[in-house]
Image (tube, grey):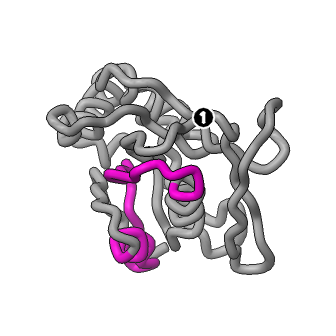
Amino acid sequence: MDIKSLVRTIPDYPSPGIQFRDITTLLHHAEGFEACIARLADPYKSMNIDVVAGIEARGFILGGAVADRLGTGFVPIRKQGKLPAKTIGETYELEYGTDEVEIHADAIDPDTNVLIVDDLIATGGTACAAVNLIRKVKGNVVGACFVIDLPDLGGLKIVEEMGVPCKSLIEFEGD
């Protein structure tokens, strides 16, 4: 199945010059969604993954399905202020300013093997923050997988330089 053909591109969203890669069209296509989850999960079936961490928001959908496929638990990585219990946060740089992601302080035990899942990697800021956050609580980030990589922006390589093996299912050139 060609899942790339199921991703819609919306020009000039959220600002002029941006080509937004919308996976909602992939998610509502039953066969495409199933193929996507299988391709994300299959490389990790023989690894000792304890928990999948999904990055807000589409990473929740994908990560939950991957966790189910792998028979693991799921941990949400959320934007600051969205989790109800005690949290641990990690700040990261945006083009203009900073942002922060958080997990519950008790979500990941030390030495837990964690797979990070998200829909898209661009510059890598959020993914790097997720890696740092998991490492703060002494979790082992054993991999990160994404449906879409924008290779011209270099995020996948940056995460790999942190010692995290990465996989993506499809690429879109440009930004």
Q: Which residue is mark 1?
A: 107
Q: How many marks?
A: 1
Range shown magenta:
135-161
Q: Nearer the viewer, residue 21 or 48?
A: 48
What residue is rendered at 47% in x and 48% in y? Answer: 139
What residue is rendered at 47% in x and 55% in y? Answer: 120
- The answer to which image quadrant residue 62 occupies is top left
Q: Nearer the viewer, residue 11 or 65?
A: 65
Residue 173 seen in the current view? no
Label 1 sits on what residue type?
Ala
Residue 88 position (above or below residue 42): below
- The answer to which image quadrant residue 100 occupies is bottom right
- Give the x, y percent position of residue 29: 39, 25
- The answer to which image quadrant residue 67 occupies is top left
- Give the x, y percent position of residue 33: 35, 28
Judge whether residue 148 is colored magenta.
Answer: yes
Is residue 73 left or right of 41 when viewed as pictured? right
Residue occupying the far front of the picture: 110
What residue is rendered at 68% in x and 70% in y? Answer: 92
